[in-house]
Image (spheres, grey):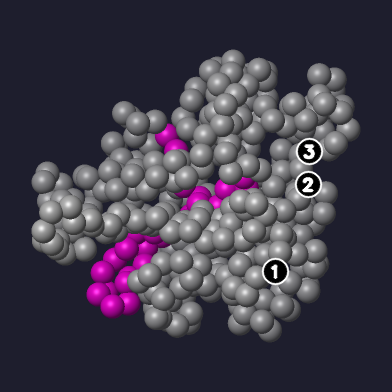
Amino acid sequence: MNEEIIQDVQNQLAGALDYDKAAKGVLSQKKVLAYILKRTVPEFESASLDDIANIYIEGQPEVSTVPVSKDKTNAVRHALERQDTPTIKGAQNEDNSITEGSIVFDILFRAKAPETNELITLIINVEAQKRLNPKKKTGDTYPLLKRAVYYASRLISSQKGTEFINSDYDKIKKVYTIWICMEAPQGKSAINRYQLKEQHLLHRYKEPCQNYDLMGIIFVYLGNSKVKDQLINLLDLMFKSSKNASEKITTLHNDFGIDLTQEGEGDLAVMCNLGEGLYEDGLIKGKEEGKKEGRTEGKLELALELLKDGMSLEKVAKYSKLSLSMIKELAKQNKLI
């Protein structure tokens, strides 16, 4: 790999990480989160967007700092219950379990359910996925949905010692993991929701749903065609539209009633600027100047996935066939070390 290719890859990586950070900043705007919750989470279907943003979402959205450590601390509860922070933490919400490895949550926050006033722990993962079936270390692929199930399970299991102790399982909080996917099956926008449901195989004994309906997984797929869905149109405007930042800000205000903060406007500008050269449909776009660059980009994708799954730097370098120094730089820029 010559120096020009290495520099090109590093530039792509830096731009991708900047885009990722900016995207999470825009998505963490409370009114944007309100659109996502109202459209995808049943508990908020009847609530107004303003009430969701101003009453039910606890605290203010903030990106990049909440640690979640299952085995060491009760950081989930402390971080999410802090009311003195201006925003909900996001990109480095890390669930660091001694026995299960380390994963990083993009945006983690709590909200109160309108009907019951119960707290629901919600997590939104915004992953700029090139594929719905990302690569694993063997070179094969895995279904992204299975990863979402794992994330949701970790949100449940990490509550022991934080939300409840010993056998007080009645104190488990409901969790949602919501994935915004820039690639859609067959190119068509879709919203899928997965949850635990009761089935009666003999007689009809009904358990109260609050005893088992504790986990929700939601996938929002952004396709290439226009649909009559407000959330899809909102996300399409932010991530796929060719409009410049000024035009997007105006449309957000006029069509969606969203006034971004000054920081949010800056993040949107970063997304627009980087989107012109580094992203296509919200995904990392490698230059099509040869097979070598393409192979390197694929190796970087694999390496980042392995790092997020908690694999050591040395093993990531081994499986991705990239230099250890490049793996360290990748981990550093993504705040994984």
User: What are the residue bounds of the magenta stretch?
Assistant: 102-129
Disc 2, SS: loop
Q: Please tell me which residue is depicted at 63% across the width and 37% down the height of the picture.
A: 333
Please name the residue that numbered disc 3 is placed on.
Answer: 286
Which image quadrant for residue 2? top right
Which of 103 and 87 lies nearest the eye of the viewer?
103
Residue 141 image offset from top left, x and y in percent: 56, 31
Disc 3, SS: loop
- Circle on res. 278: 2
Residue count near mark 1 (Cα–Cα under 10 Å), binned few <14, some 14–19, many ≥20: few
Magenta stretch: dominant SS? strand
Which image quadrant for residue 68? top left
Q: CA–CA distance between discs 2 and 3?
A: 7 Å
Please name the residue that numbered disc 1 is placed on.
Answer: 226
Which kind of residue does numbered mark 3 sit on? Gly
Residue 191 image offset from top left, x and y in percent: 52, 61
Viewer-nearest of labels 1 and 2? Answer: 1
Q: In this view, does 205 lie to the left or right of 176?
A: left
Q: Which of marks 1 and 2 is nearer the N terminus?
A: 1
Above/below status of 92 relative to 7: below
Residue 227 image offset from top left, x and y in percent: 65, 70
Above/below status of 170 relative to 160: below
> Is residue 254 highlighted in magenta?
no
Q: Is residue 283 left or right of residue 75?
A: right
Q: CA–CA distance between discs 1 and 3?
A: 26 Å
Which quadrant does the N terminus fall into? top right
Residue count near mark 2 (Cα–Cα under 10 Å), binned few <14, some 14–19, many ≥20: many
